[in-house]
Amino acid sequence: MGFKRWKVLSLAGALVLGYAVSSQAVEIKVSDETFGEIGANLKIWYLNADELEKRGDYTKNEFYVGNMRFYAKGQISKLVQFYGEIDSGTNRNTELSEAGINLAFVPEFQIRAGQIRVPFSRYQLTDDYAQIIPSGVAWTGSKFISSTLDPQEVLPSNPYAFSPKNDGKADVGAVVHGSIEKGMFRYALGIFNEDRIGKANKNFEYAVRVEFTPTMFGFKPEGDSITGIVKDTYLGAKDVLTIGLGYDYEKVLDRNVLGKGLTRKSWTVDALVEKKCGLWVPNLQLGYISMNDSHFKDISNLKKGDTDAWYVQAQLLYDQMVGFGKPALALRYDDVEADDDLKVRRWGVVLNYYLKGEAARISLGFDNVSYKDNAKDILKEDGLEDKLTNWYLYFQTKF
């Protein structure tokens, strides 16, 4: 039998072996040092959206494919690691979500480069397929929250989105990161392309994040060293307690556009704790984000405005099979304010049913969004409702 045929059979055997030992991906092993995995993730939604316009009593009632993701991850050697994700969904072209190369010199010093997560807030580092609230922070039907890339709007910027890529989580750049004292301390220093209106890529965006985990009390550190990604919940697989601090600096508007430039300076603090207690796994996450000079609150005199946000999120998982899976009740509250006169309140409640962890999951939930003060007046002028309640049924698989 020729060498090429042996090579094909060896690869097929590696694929079969990888599938047998992994429930969520196909693993390919070339040697003890060179290996990888490939897989596909899927999100299916049924959405019943509340009345979006006063005129016409319009509501939305539909099924749709929210996301289909193909991914690959592995290492060429102990030093060189890689990963990548390609996304597609309803009314969306196939696009690159993330792609990076990580040079793992030592745990304390590594370099990640590519289209990668911006190390600022916990939201930006959270796995899209490991969110307790599957709707995330994308409030369907909300006109109030503006894009960070359009500061000319007299509306607050989205405090969770710092990039036009991957729902504001990723951008093109490089990050120096590391783990100290076996994960007790973790740091990330990032430099990214600047998304400045008027003169894009003229300079850089800078992001810094540090995290602390009290490992001396039995808590485990978080984060995939290749991707930098964390999860909302580990479903009782390990006890976690992470406290994070972040800072981000970026010029978002060139002076030549309106006669005055805009430089956004942001900082954040957040924390996650999850600990298995017998048959129960309680989870709590808190966070605060402050954005200085995030937009112009008065376009006539170019008066700059700020945006602040805080949130609380929790889940209680019953870590026993009930029927086909494990049930959990989750909730989230968001408060976003700009210049003390534009306010958004959001409640999200979800019943999660984990058929096989995050690999197979069904969720039933709703988001209630209300607008206050000047935000309410802006929506009324456009004939839009100031309160929305959206119900959804969500299906997720990871392979």
Image: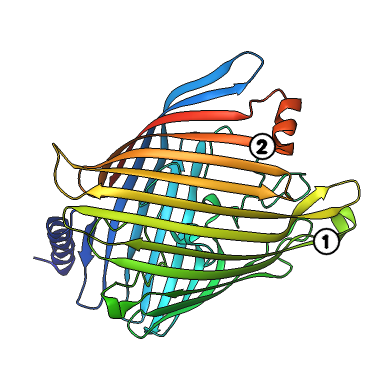
The earlier-in-sequence mark between 1 and 2 is 1
- In this rendering, would 41 be left or right of 8? right
Which residue is disc 1 drawn over? Answer: 261
Q: Tell me the amino acid under the disc marked 2.
A: Lys
Nearer to us in this view, 387 or 224: 387
Identified at 18% across, 50% down, the residue is: 319
User: Is 334 on the left-hand or right-hand side of 42?
Assistant: right
Q: Position of residue 26 (x, y in %)?
A: 22, 56
Q: Nearer the viewer, mark 1 or mark 2?
A: 2
Q: Looking at the rendered structure, which numbered label has been put on residue 77?
A: none
Q: Amino acid at mark 1?
A: Gly
Q: Is residue 399 visible?
A: no
Q: Secondary structure at mark 2?
A: strand
CA gap, disc 1 and disc 2: 29 Å
Q: From this viewpoint, which residue is outermost toward the top? A: 56
For residue 197, side relative to residue 396 (left or right): right
Res. 252 image quadrant: bottom right
Residue 12 visible in the displayed image = yes
From the image, which quarter does the N terminus lie in?
bottom left
Task: Look at mark 2 in the image and give the residue it sits on.
Answer: 372
Location of residue 304 with respect to 271 vertically, above or below: above
Q: Nearer the viewer, residue 83 or 154?
A: 154
Residue in front for this viewpoint, 228 or 105: 228
Question: Percent from the top left, x then y, of residue 206?
Answer: 63, 71
Q: Residue furthest left?
A: 1
Q: How far from the left and from the top, in percent, is residue 199? A: 77, 61
Say few, some or many: other residues with alpha carbon within 10 Å of mark 2 (under 14 / 14 to 19 / 20 or more): some
